[in-house]
Amino acid sequence: MHLTVDVLGIESGGKPIVFLNKSDADEIGVTASGRVSLRAKKEITAIVNISTKTVKKGHIGISEEIRQLFGTSPHKLD
C-alpha cells in the first residue's frame, strides 16, 4: 500500500511510531501496537497507533524518530 507521508512533529521517546487511519489499518489488517514495515530509501519497522481524526485515509503520520531515521521527510512510503 502506498501512503502519503505527514510528519506530525511528535517525539515518541526514541521509538519509531506511525499513525494510521482506521480504514487503512483495517485494510492491511494491522491493529494498534502492531508492526508495519516502512520503505523509502531504506526499510524500518514501526509501531502502529490508530487514528480516526488525526490522519486522513491514504496518509500515514510519522514521528520525529522516523523522520530522523530516513534522514529527510519522505513524501511516499511503501
Image (cartoon, grey):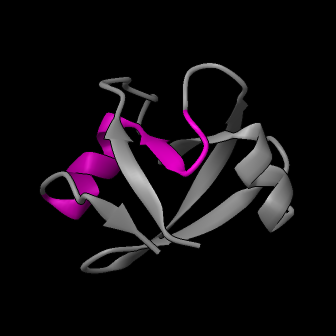
Residue 33 appears in the figure: no
Pinpoint residue 58: horizontal percent, then vertical percent.
Answer: 55, 51
**Residue 52 part of the magenta-drawn span:** no
Q: Nearer the viewer, residue 2 or 38?
A: 2
Quarter of the figure that contains the N terminus: bottom right
Residue stretch in magenta: 56-71
- Residue 61 coordinates in the image, percent (x, y): 46, 39
Q: Nearer the viewer, residue 72 or 57?
A: 57
Query: Which of 48/54 is in front?
Result: 54
Q: Is residue 55 above or below residue 24?
A: above
Asked whether residue 35 is in view, the answer is yes
Q: Find residue 75 and report its horizontal and vertical position in percent.
A: 25, 58
Taking the image as shown, residue 77 lies to the left or right of residue 74, namely: right
On the picture, is 61 further left or further right than 24? left
Count all numbered tags in the image, as a single digit: 0
Q: Is residue 59 magenta?
A: yes
Residue 78 vertical placement versus 3 (above, below): below
The residue depicted at 39 percent of the width and 37 percent of the height is 63
At horizontal 86% and vertical 63% (from top left) the residue drawn is 29
Left/right of residue 12 with respect to residue 35 in the rendered view: left
Q: Residue at x 53, y 43 (%)?
A: 17
